[in-house]
Image (tube, grey):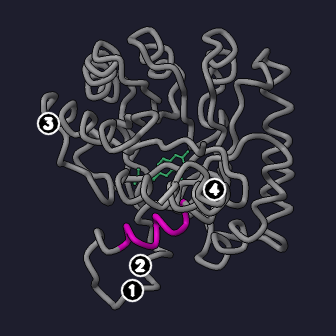
């Protein structure tokens, strides 16, 4: 089954849910709702990666995320920590997180590779060329993303990260145009040959382009769920989404399709 990571941004400024889950009890209640709706992991982030955002001091990031990580781990909810900072990743794993999700794939903080190796938890290596504000320049986006991710995996293995810890992510929207994102989705099989693949398309701007101008962000949940099903059918390991229920349903549709509805007798 394709894994679902439910997004929980405990930031004042993330682009789609910023400012909503800053209170601990609100954050935990939202995580519990996503868990009940079918999330396998809650991906907790304390630093916005929206275009134009500024880097957060790792201590402030930890003040935001660690109480949430602890509370979720206490409630037996699997937690992934979305961070580029090795110190935050390490502290979050000590607080109970069992996956590190690094949008820089270990490039932002040189200590991240060693922390992934020492902790031994799952490690999401997202494709990154310096953030969302970097100009997207590719000749062949699929083969360039593939070869850059392949090089990252090789380097991380040198640090002592085990191949079975590694998950890759094409980093949709991070120094990519809408067309680059679609090309990466069309070429997903090029990535699934390398390692398990996570897709983070949820509510991103390229989906907004399918909708009427100024449509509210929530309208992007239907195309997000469609992408979840299509990514699953293309062999993705997991999807990172805000609207867990819509993606759960879309993945269930794919599951029935794939199995010919095995188990549905009437
Ligand atoms: N996108 C965002 C944040 N973290 N992590 C992974 N692995 N893949 C992504 O595509 C990704 C991510 C930005 O989205 P948000 O502001 O809605 O969290």
Q: Which mark is residue 195?
A: none
Residue 110 percent coordinates (x, y): 66, 26
In the rendered image, is residue 134 in sight? no
| Foreground: disc 1 or disc 4 | 4
Residue 79 percent coordinates (x, y): 42, 26
Instruction: Report the Cα–Cα distance between label 1 and label 4.
Output: 23 Å
In the rendered structure, the answer to whether residue 204 lies left or right of residue 36 reads: right
Q: Which residue is mark 1?
A: 211
Say if the magenta span includes residue 72: no
Q: Which residue is mark 4?
A: 232
Chain part drawn in magenta: 220-228
Q: Earlier in the sequence, mark 1 or mark 4?
A: 1
Question: CB atoms at circles 1 and 2 under 8 Å apart?
Answer: yes
Residue 49 percent coordinates (x, y): 43, 51
Q: Earlier in the sequence, mark 3 or mark 1?
A: 3
Q: Which mark is residue 26?
A: 3
Ligand 1 neighbours mark 1 (CB distance < 8 Å): no
> With respect to residue 169, does 119 lie above or below?
above
Instruction: Report the Cα–Cα distance between label 3 and label 4.
Output: 31 Å
């Amino acid at each position: 089954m394709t894994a679902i990571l439910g997004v929980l941004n405990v930031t004042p400024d993330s682009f789609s849910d910023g400012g909503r889950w800053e209170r601990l009890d609100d954050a935990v209640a939202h995580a519990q709702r996503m868990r009940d709706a079918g999330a396998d992991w809650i991906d907790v982030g304390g630093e916005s990666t929206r275009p134009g955002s500024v880097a957060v001091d790792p201590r402030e990031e930890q003040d935001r995320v660690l109480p949430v990580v602890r509370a979720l781990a206490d409630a037996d909810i699997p937690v992934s920590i979305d961070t580029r900072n090795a110190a935050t990743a390490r502290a979050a794993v000590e607080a109970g997180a069992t996956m590190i999700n690094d949008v820089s794939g270990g490039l932002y903080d040189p200590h991240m590779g060693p922390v992934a190796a020492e902790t031994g938890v799952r490690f999401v290596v997202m494709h990154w060329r310096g953030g969302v504000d970097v100009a997207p320049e590719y000749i062949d986006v699929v083969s360039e993303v593939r070869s850059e991710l392949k090089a990252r995996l090789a380097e991380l293995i040198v640090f002592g990260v085990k191949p079975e810890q590694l998950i890759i992510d094409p980093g949709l929207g991070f120094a990519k145009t809408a067309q680059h994102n679609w090309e990466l989705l069309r070429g997903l099989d090029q990535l699934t040959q390398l390692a398990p693949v996570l897709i983070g398309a949820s509510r991103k701007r390229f989906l907004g382009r399918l909708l009427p101008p100024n449509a509210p962000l929530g309208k992007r949940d239907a195309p997000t769920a469609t992408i979840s099903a299509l990514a699953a059918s293309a062999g993705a390991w997991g999807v990172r989404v805000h609207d867990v229920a819509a993606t759960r349903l879309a993945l269930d549709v794919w599951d029935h399709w794939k199995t010919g509805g095995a188990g549905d007798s009437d």
